[in-house]
Amino acid sequence: MNIPKTDKKRVVVIGGGFAGISLAKKLKDLDVQLVLLDKQNYHTFQPLLYQVSTSGLEPDSIAYPLRKVLRKLNNFYFRWATVERIDPEQRRVITSKGDLSYDFLVLATGTKTNYFGNKDIEKYTMPMKSVPQALNIRSLMLQNFEKADDCVDEKERNALMNFCIIGAGPTGVELAGAFAELKNNVFPKDYRHLDISEMQIHLFEGGPRILPPMSVKASKKALQFLCKLGVTVRLNTIVEGYDGETLTLKNGETIASKNCIWTAGVTGAAIEGFNKDVLVDRINRYKVNEFNQVEGYTNIFAIGDIALMQTKEYPKGHPQVAQPAIQQGELLAKNLKSLLLGKEMKPFRYYDKGTMATVGRNKAVVDLKRAKFGGFFAWYIWMFVHLMALVGFRNRVIVFFNWVYNYINFDKAARLIVRPYKPKE
């Protein structure tokens, strides 16, 4: 992999998400050789992927080159590679670009879409976990509206304008709200010869309420917002299958739709090479202790969404959101320094800063420890927090001006089919 041999300890980090870059930044003054491996050469700000999918932002607004993020680090190497396997006994990482030895290994691989074993759902629905996938959704949406504009068959036209979102967590709720804003504010001006009222947005949730990770108050408030925007929310509804044209529910009901997006769950993006006992079944998260060490290993760590640290406060592990990943990455950097100096490591304690979700223009919900609220003020807080969390000053400026433009003009300017999407057959 053309990485020079060194007498310094080599720290290999797999994954350039929130956890990986938080760790790497804090290793700036540590006298080690740092190697970051990722199958993409950029960091993605996943909380705003839905805005790329719905033409609110261009992808370069929420993506940032990993080499630029970490260019101030000394003795740092990045390799654009896919990690295929870990060999813990030989202390080696096997990748698509070659093998690499390590002294300390950090797994920060995050999650991938969980289809719960449903092959048809996996084949035909649209996931949204990466920039290319978000662009696919944007292209498919616009392509189908172009087809609907010259379609004479009413049933076919309705299927082209029918949007089904499966999973009412934060991603599904935010996506549904963004589609509703397109329906209410943008598409009537773009497609003046179409009856935009034929556009239907369905949000399906298998449980009794939307936004399950948030409070009941937030769920009720978000549901009110969605209904006001014209979204059809179906609770306690299980989707059994989808063939690219027809969505089938567990109760036997069918819905014709050419736009079906899966946001119903994630599973850990685990890497082969470890004993099966290390992974927790179904969710594929590595068992770690309070220092983020993978069970059974002293020199292998897991941080972020891929790590399962069970505590009294979080018996099912920490929530798979940005804050635990960032905090674990920052603490692990300090603990690696302690290890090299022969000092004791500090256990991880998660500081919950709250959760939030936006439903649309002037509509959001926020859960803090001592307060829960929704509406314009919650929306303002949501925007400020996400803007400040973006990597890079340029990205913050671009996103800010996009949001201002969209707010003033009731518009979303990135309605481009740059790369046409071909649905699977």
Image (tube, rainbow, N blue to C red):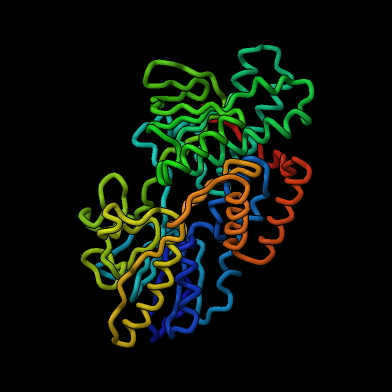
Q: Is residue 215 above or below residue 237?
A: below
- Relative placement, left or right, of 259 versus 398 is left
Instruction: Tell me where residue 182 appears, x and y as whole percent.
Output: 68, 34
Quadrant assignment, res 370: bottom left
Q: For this rendering, which residue is in front, 395 or 79?
A: 395
| Above or below: residue 332 compared with residue 254 | below
Residue at 50% from the left image edge and 46% from the top image edge: 129
Instruction: Tell me how many marks there are.
Output: 0
Residue toward you, 421 or 308: 308
Q: Which residue is rendered at x = 42% and y = 82% of the image? A: 32
Among the 4 quarters of the image, the one containing residue 423: top right
Task: Give the quadrant of residue 290.
Answer: bottom left
The residue closer to the viewer here, 103 or 108, is 108
Above or below for 134 versus 235: below
Residue 254 locus on image (x, y percent)? 46, 17
Location of residue 24 in the rendering, given as x and y in whole percent from the top left corner: 47, 72
Furthest toward the front, the residue is: 370
Residue at 40% across, 71% down: 12
Q: Nearer the viewer, residue 16 or 287?
A: 287
Q: In the rendered view, does 9 fall on the left or right side of 37? A: left
Is residue 362 rendered to the left or right of residue 11? right
Residue located 33% across and 84% down the image: 340
